Image (cartoon, grey):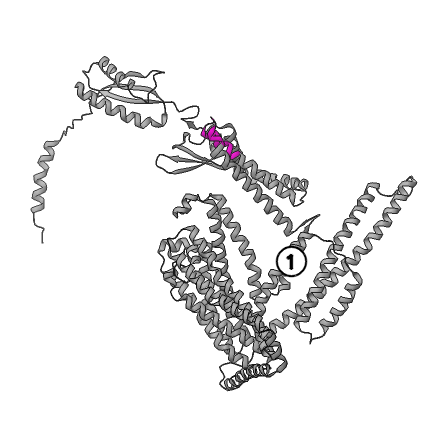
């Protein structure tokens, strides 16, 4: 486990150094003679089976450096060779036999270029050979180390359940502690070391006391402040502050721990065993204080991390004690590793010592898996279904099952005798859980920071959730999640046995890129593309927001035109951002145009519907036959236009249903737009009165009612029409032009109420249809009824 954590820190250091070196772009000279010496020494080391892994790793690092230098040399030489060949191509092919000879100047220039080509090609070939030789030696070293790691991991040793090994392990453990005690006694009895200790006493006392103050009183002060902060009313800003404050539970004790260890070093009381143990103390401290930090964030009521992740800690009761116990198990395992460094123990001794720790670690995994399972069981069906659709929900479900399996397999494998395999399975799983928990906390912290900037100050002060910026907020969250996943993958690989050199080789390959034709793509090109596109995308959204909220509302442009301008600006901005991002990678756009031309043929056949809708969407935004807020009728659907996108248009019906209509149907079909030029529209109100009513009086009454309505225009004037002599009534119609056709139903209702009241006051009858029903054979039906009754009373025959 110590090697795993050391590898993680080595990987992070490598990435930081690689980034700084890459930023400097300093030229590196390839020393061929030195490389040949190193390669010869490497071949000797590889053939020696007794060479330790540390020496092989050191040699591999040196070879990897030479391999990178030879690749850079190849690129430099290849550019020169390519330039000379282009110059030769300009001269054309030399004249064939029987053709007129070329001029002396051309022939001389051709000879010069051929000489330069031969001069440049020789170092290129040498660099290519060195690159291949270095790569071959690196592959041999990797193969040797992987074979050794596999043999160690799968080595079948003595079973820790064999009772005869217990006494041997007990004696070895007691001898180890006796040795540590003897080293301490020797250190205090040595006069020279006592003088050194006395001279260092002031610094030792200061460091030890300061370290203890940071470990205990400072940690308790942070805990109290954290408890006070989380006890207050929850809001996003306070949750963020509490999370930052919780980092003091990790940082302050770790600083104090390092100061304490440094004070012990100055005291000069450690021997060989103590020095080996001292090398593991930082890892023990990181394990213990890291576990405290995770537990205080996730498993304590009101923990800031749980607040940011919306976790109900009441369903995770006891999780804090489990995490603390697992940290203690890790610490004891480090002590066993420290003992291995100085003691020549037989195989059964570390097996017997480690087996109880493996069992306890597996038990902790099972308890955590059961708590996660119970947490999910306590959720409502709706919340559980929603959680299963999220990435965190899927990860939680997979981890629960995986931890359960590991909790069973790890101890069984170790009990058989595969103690290294069992320990690796259990402790690697625990480290993976710690890493995943840390990444979730970091994700919650970064997302909270983003949402803090996106919320209004008033919403923050009142503790409201607020609204994010829509798709942009989701995009930033996805970017944060993707970055954390990219960070976690190599660390997870190191936890499960990958070497730092494997990750560094992959990083170097990504940094140097891969060649596709004449173009090389590298991680720097990708990062440049992402950075420039992100900047362009952000600027586009900011400009759209400024136009939508500050500029366009102060103009006389209608809402539909404003929406079209903002949407069009978005398309143009994203297109320009993508174009600039592609150009930043050095991609030849002429080749891209050729590819686009070839794809257009396939698009014409396979994606013609999508392209048709896209082009129709552009036409809708430019020509604007319909616009945002228009009342339209398309086929059987009638409603308001709520959104015009690239592929389709959303229409909200009067039933509050949303109808998605492809843009091609709007351009190619018939659309009724009630509010295209203006909001004026005609309303028709039919009225029926009884026969015997005076038509002229009816006309006068209706005119008076319609002229008084505020939503009806005076010009053109409303009309009252006597339409027909109906079957039951005299049929009239009111026809008028409304100021706003959206109020058609309201105006119709107002007029009907007014007409009903006025007709009632005037005594005018509003007729309704009456129907008389005549039954022709009623007498026959009356005669048949007694016969039916008598037949029912007749008893059945026996």
From the top left corner, tell me how far across and down residue 532 is, in percent.
60, 44
Which image quadrant for residue 282? bottom right
Could you say where residue 365 lies in the image, as x and y percent from the top left? Answer: 45, 68
Give the secondary structure at mark 1. Answer: helix
Q: Position of residue 199 (x, y in %)?
A: 61, 74
Q: Residues within 10 Å of mark 1 (few under 14, many from 20)?
A: few
Instruction: Name the residue at 72% across, 73% down.
Output: 47
Q: Is residue 433 magenta?
A: no
Q: Give the residue displayed 62% in from the left and 76% down from the top.
A: 196
**Residue 559 among magenta residues:** yes
Chief secondary structure of the magenta portion: helix
Q: Quadrant where the C terminus lies?
A: bottom left
Magenta part of the chain: 551-568
The x, y position of residue 257, in whole percent, is: 53, 68
Q: Quadrant of the N terminus?
A: bottom right
Would you name the residue on which mark 1 appears? 17
Of 379 and 58, nearer the camera is: 58
Of residues 148 and 482, the one nearer the viewer is 482
Above/below status of 600 relative to 741: below
Q: Left or right? Give the position of 794 relative to 521.
A: left
- Among the 4 quarters of the image, the one containing residue 495: bottom right
Let me know if residue 155 appears in the view. no
């Amino acid at each position: 486990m110590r090697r795993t954590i050391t590898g993680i820190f080595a990987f992070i250091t490598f990435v930081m150094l690689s980034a700084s070196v890459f930023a400097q772009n300093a030229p590196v000279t390839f020393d061929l003679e030195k490389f040949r010496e190193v390669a010869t020494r490497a071949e000797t080391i590889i053939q020696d089976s007794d060479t330790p892994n540390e020496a092989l790793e050191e040699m591999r690092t040196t070879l990897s450096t030479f391999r990178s230098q030879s690749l850079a040399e190849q690129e430099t030489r290849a550019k020169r060779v390519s330039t000379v060949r282009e110059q030769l191509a300009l001269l054309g092919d030399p004249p064939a036999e029987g053709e007129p000879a070329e001029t002396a100047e051309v022939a001389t220039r051709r000879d010069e270029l051929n000489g330069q080509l031969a001069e440049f090609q020789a170092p290129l070939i040498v660099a290519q050979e060195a690159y291949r030789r270095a790569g071959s030696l690196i592959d041999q070293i990797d193969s040797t180390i992987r074979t050794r790691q596999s043999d160690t991991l799968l080595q079948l040793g003595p079973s820790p359940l064999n009772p005869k090994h217990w006494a041997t392990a007990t004696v070895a453990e007691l001898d180890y502690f006796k040795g540590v005690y003897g080293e301490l006694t020797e250190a205090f009895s040595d006069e020279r070391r006592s003088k050194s200790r006395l001279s260092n006493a002031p610094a030792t006392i200061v460091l030890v006391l300061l370290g203890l103050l940071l470990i205990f009183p400072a940690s308790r002060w942070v805990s109290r402040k954290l408890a006070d902060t989380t006890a207050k009313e929850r809001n996003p800003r306070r949750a963020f502050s509490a999370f930052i404050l919780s980092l003091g539970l990790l940082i302050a004790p770790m600083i104090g721990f390092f100061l304490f260890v440094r004070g012990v070093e100055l005291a000069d009381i450690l021997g060989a065993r103590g020095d080996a143990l001292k090398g593991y103390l930082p890892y023990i401290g990181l394990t213990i204080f890291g576990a405290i930090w995770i537990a205080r964030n996730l498993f304590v009521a009101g923990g800031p991390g749980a607040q940011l992740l919306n976790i109900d800690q009441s369903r995770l009761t006891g999780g804090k004690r489990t995490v603390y116990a697992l940290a203690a198990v890790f610490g004891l395992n480090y002590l066993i590793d420290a003992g291995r460094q100085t003691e020549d123990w037989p195989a059964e001794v570390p097996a017997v010592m480690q087996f109880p720790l493996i069992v306890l670690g597996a038990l902790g995994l099972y308890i955590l898996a059961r708590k996660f399972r119970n947490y999910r069981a306590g959720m409502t069906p709706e919340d559980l279904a929603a959680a299963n659709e999220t990435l965190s929900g899927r990860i939680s479900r997979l981890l629960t099952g995986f931890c359960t399996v590991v909790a069973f397999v790890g101890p069984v494998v170790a009990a058989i005798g595969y103690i290294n395999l069992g320990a690796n399975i259990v402790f690697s799983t625990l480290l993976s859980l710690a890493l995943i928990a840390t990444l979730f906390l970091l994700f919650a912290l970064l997302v909270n920071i983003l949402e803090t900037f996106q919320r209004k100050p008033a919403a923050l002060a009142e503790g409201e959730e607020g609204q994010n910026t829509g798709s942009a907020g989701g995009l930033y969250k996805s970017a944060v999640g993707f970055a954390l996943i990219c960070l976690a993958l190599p660390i997870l690989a190191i936890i499960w046995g990958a070497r730092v050199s494997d990750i560094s080789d992959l990083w170097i390959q990504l940094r140097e890129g891969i060649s596709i034709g004449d173009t090389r793509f590298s991680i720097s090109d990708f990062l440049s593309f992402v950075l420039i596109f992100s900047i362009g995308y952000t600027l586009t959204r900011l400009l759209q927001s400024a136009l939508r909220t500050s500029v366009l509302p102060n103009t006389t442009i209608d809402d539909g035109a404003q929406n079209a301008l903002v949407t069009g600006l978005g398309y143009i901005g994203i297109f320009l951002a993508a174009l600039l991002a592609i150009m930043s990678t050095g991609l030849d756009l002429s080749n891209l145009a050729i590819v686009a031309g070839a794809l257009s043929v396939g698009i014409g056949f396979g994606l013609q519907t999508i392209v048709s809708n896209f082009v129709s969407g552009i036409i809708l935004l430019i020509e604007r036959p319909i616009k945002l807020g228009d009342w339209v009728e398309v086929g059987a659907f009638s409603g308001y236009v709520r959104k015009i996108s690239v592929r389709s248009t959303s229409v909200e019906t009067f039933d509050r249903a949303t109808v998605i209509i492809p843009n091609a149907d709007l351009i190619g079909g018939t659309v009724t737009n009630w509010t295209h030029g203006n909001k004026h529209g005609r309303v028709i109100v039919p009225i029926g009165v009884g026969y015997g009513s005076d038509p002229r009086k009816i006309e006068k009454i209706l005119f008076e009612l319609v002229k008084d309505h505020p939503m009806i225009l005076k010009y053109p004037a409303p009309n009252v029409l006597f339409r027909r002599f109906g079957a039951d009534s005299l049929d009239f119609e009111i026809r008028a032009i409304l100021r706003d056709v959206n109020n058609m139903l309201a105006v119709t209702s107002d007029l009907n109420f007014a007409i009903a009241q006025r007709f009632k006051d005037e005594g005018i009858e509003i007729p309704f249809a009456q129907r008389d029903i005549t039954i022709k054979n009623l007498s026959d039906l009356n005669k048949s009824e007694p016969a039916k009754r008598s037949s029912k009373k007749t008893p059945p025959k026996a």
